Image (tube, helix red, strand yellow):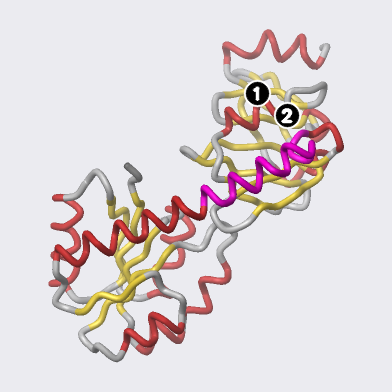
Amino acid sequence: MRLLKTIVIDSNSDVVAQLSKFAEENSVIIEICAFSDSLSEAMPLIKAHKPELIFLDATPINLSEFHLIKQLDFNIPKFIFISNDITKAYDAFRYNATDFQLKPLDFNDLIVCIYKVIKLIEMELSFQNQKVNQIKSYGSETSDNGFIAISSSDKIELIKVEDIMYCKAEGKYTEFVLSNKQKILSSKNLGEYNSLLLNNYFFRIHHSYVVNIKKIVKIVKKDGFYCEFEHGVSLPVAKRRQEEFVKFIKI
C-alpha cells in the first residue's frame, strides 16, 4: 500500500484537527508532514518535504498564489481542494485538482478521495515505467549511447550521462544533480541507477551518493575522505568504501 506524504494548507483549526485525526486512524496510507495557513507560507515546506498530496483550502488568496507551484523542480503534488463553498468545486476542476471535499469533512468521503489519489499516482507510474521499458528495449536508457532516461510520475527526461555530477538517494527516489546546478527527481531508487551507471567514471562513494569522478575537483583527506565538486559541493566517502575508492581512481 502506498503511503502518501501530505501537507495541509488551511487556517481552520477544526479542519486541521479533522485531518490530523484522519491521518492517525489511517497511518498506512497517509502521513501529514506539515501544516500551513496559506500557500505562499507553505512553499518552503513543500520544497523541503516534496509531498505527493496537498490539501488546499480553496480561498481566493490561495488560488491567486497557485502559480507558485510552477516553481517546484520536482513532481507536482496532487491537490485536494477543500472549502465550505460548494461552488469552489469548479475551481478544483479549473486548477486540475484530483478531487474536492466539502467542509465539514466526512471520513468516508476522505477515504474514497485518498484511494483515488493513490490510484492516479500508481497509474501514472505504471505508464511511465512502460515508456521507460520501451526506451530500454531500444537501448536508450543505458549509458552506452551517452544518455540516460530519468522517469518521474509525469514525464521522462533524457539527459547526457556526462552532465551528471552526482546522484543522491532521497528515500525511495533519486535526485540527479547536473553540472549546471539543475536537479531532477526520479521515481526510481539509487540502487537501480547505480547498476545502470557502472562504468569507468561512476562510483558509489556512500550509501546515499553515486558520483561522476570526472566532475571531482579535488579529494580532501582530512578526518576521512571528501569529494569536492564545483559550486562548493562536498560529499563524504564512506569509511568502508575508501580503500576501494582509492583503487578505483588509482591514487
How far, Cα to Cα, is label 1 from label 2? 10 Å
Of marks 1 and 2, the one in the foreground: 2
- The image shows residue 171 at horizontal and vertical percentages of 46, 38
Foreground: 119 or 22?
Answer: 119
Q: Residue at x 42, y 84 (%)?
A: 63
Residue 115: horizontal and vertical position, in percent?
30, 56
Q: Which residue in the structure is indicated by mark 2? A: 197
Magenta residues, start to end? 125-142
Please state which amino acid type lies under the numbered disc 2: Leu
Q: Main secondary structure of the magenta part?
A: helix
Residue nearest the observer in this picture, 120 or 8: 120
Image coords of residue 13 (percent x, y): 16, 72
Q: Nearer the viewer, residue 78 or 175?
A: 78
Of the 4 image quadrants, the one containing the C terminus is: top right
Q: Does the magenta segment cover residue 129?
A: yes
Image quarter of residue 208: top right
- Residue 192 is situated, as x and y percent measured from the top left of the image, at 60, 30
The crowding category of the residue bearing disc 2, from other C-alpha atoms within 10 Å (few below 14, some 14 to 19, many at least 20), is many
Horizontal side of residue 94 vs 237, given as left or right:
left
- Residue 193: image quadrant is top right
Q: Residue at x 46, y 80 (%)?
A: 95
**Residue under circle 1?**
204
